[in-house]
Image: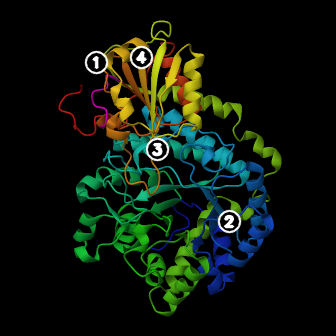
Amino acid sequence: MRKVDLTANPYFLDENGINWVETTLQEMDDDAKIKQLFAPIVMSTNKSEAVEWVKKYQPAGLMYRPEAKEALQDVFRAMQQHSDVPLLIAANLEAGGNGLVNEGTYVGRQLQIAATDDEEYAYQLGRICGKEAEALGCNWAFAPVIDIDYNFRNPITNVRTYGNDPERVLRMGRAYKHGFDESHGAVSIKHFPGDGVDDRDQHLHVTYNRLSVNEWQNSYGKVYRGLIEEGAHTVMIGHIAFPEYSRAKGISDEKIRPATLAPELMGDLLRDELGFNGMIVTDASVMGGFTMLEKREFAVPYSIAAGADCFLFNRDLDEDIMYMKKGIENGILTMERVNDAVRRILGVKASLGLHQKAELVPGKAALDIVGCEEHQAIARAAADKGITLVKDTQKLLPIDPQEKRRVYMQAVGVEEDTPIYQYLLKKLTDAGFEVDAKPVHNWGFKDMSISVEQIKQQYDLAIFYANEATMSNRTQVRINWGMLGFNIPWFIEELPTMFISTANPYHLIDVPHIKTFINGYSDSEYVVDAIIEKILGRSPFVGINPIDPYCDGRFELKL
């Protein structure tokens, strides 16, 4: 495995930067170097607790889940002030500043941005993420997601991706990075060697990218190579195996491991073939794809030995530090490899200028940009451009509320009081519709007796709304109907019916006979606002299909 070159992409360090890296490394004892390999998740915004924690562990970096902006900024400032080496502070900045901070701008899920087919919106997504993160002192984006959504059954990729076209994924991923670069932070492209082929979830067990080596090189390889050449500082390695590549390296099937434990994937493929000189960070080490193949005592140090530089999240940080030290004592991991890993970590920090910043976390006034009107206006525009009319074979649209006033409304994938559902109901009412919202649950045999004539007499229009969102540890994203399907759109030949999704774009597999289908991709108020404008005919549908909503030819006909 090649050694780091701090003068080359993505570092481009001058003599002063290199001297800081080398001096800092030399001043660390082995204990400090080992702690620098970790990037845990932190939960507490209590400043005194956070300060004591950072003084004890002195990690490479850390990540918080979204909290209130002032509390986060205060705790980040306190932690940076008590860290011996500037911290990398990370967040899942995939859809907007809301990935870091409660008040952050929800620009839109990546698939919504892809549906605009306009790199400007990917650039603006990256810029807004960067500027809102910078205001709090966050300098590391676990984004963009450059997985390719090849498998409609995959429960994780879906709306988190830029779709199923490698060229569009590359264009959008590159544009996001250019936008984020304006905040002088680092992106982490993920999840190498690429999610979206398997239909399972690496949070629960190892998953597999089953492409041939040639297929991979022309898809995922092209995207990773492009972002590496653009100067991506870090790559997040998934608990995803790439069997065909590992076999080509002479590894037997029983020894094939996910990338986080595979030197041939991190070293031969990512470092040598793709030329990545930056920092490799593992995906969360608490995930089943990492924990189930090897004893943790072996896996923790071996992940670094195999080529990772930074170890993300822990079950027990003290225990993992102990395992790392025991791995060195037992010969699993060498201090030479540790030194190279820490040098790469320090190189990222120097490349971002953290070593010479007088103020690593700005003052309170900087928070004004978080959720500002300029960013909200861009989110509104992205919603308008991204919504996709998948089909309207019955020529239902546009709708005049005076002609089709009485609405049969059925929601799935939400609870009755889900805010975005309640917002949709309000917007429909404000537009002049009389909405009869059917229960989300509690359908029973009594509902079987509704007649065709009742439906035709009581309603002019039916709207089915789904917000079946993708999330970790959810093994499928499909519509689950009520008892015996009593709440399905059984009356579509009697009553004009349309289906709206603001999450999973593949619901046609469960409602193939629906004649009017709209994909919104993001469960934001701006998306709902834009959908209402479009169904009323006040705004045209211009979004493209960044995936195949017909689920890879699952329908003989596009009904």
Q: 120 or 368, which is in the foreground?
A: 368
Circle 1 or circle 3, nearest the eye? 1
Q: Residue furthest left?
A: 556
Which residue is label 3 attached to?
Answer: 469
Mark with earlier residue (2, 4)? 2
Q: Are marks 1 and 3 in contact (CB under 8 Å)?
A: no
Mark with earlier residue (2, 1)? 2
Residue 103 in view here: yes
**Magenta segment:** 510-516
Mark with earlier residue (3, 2)? 2
Q: If the image is split into quadrants, where does the C terminus sit?
A: top left
Quote the CA–CA distance across marks 2 and 4: 55 Å
Q: Are marks 3 and 4 in contact (CB under 8 Å)?
A: no
Mark 3 residue crowding within 10 angstroms, few (<14) / some (14–19) / many (20+): many
Circle 3 or circle 2, nearest the eye? 3
Quote the CA–CA distance across marks 1 and 3: 29 Å
Mark with earlier residue (1, 4)? 4
Residue 514 in magenta stretch = yes
Looking at the image, residue 382 lies above or below residue 80: above
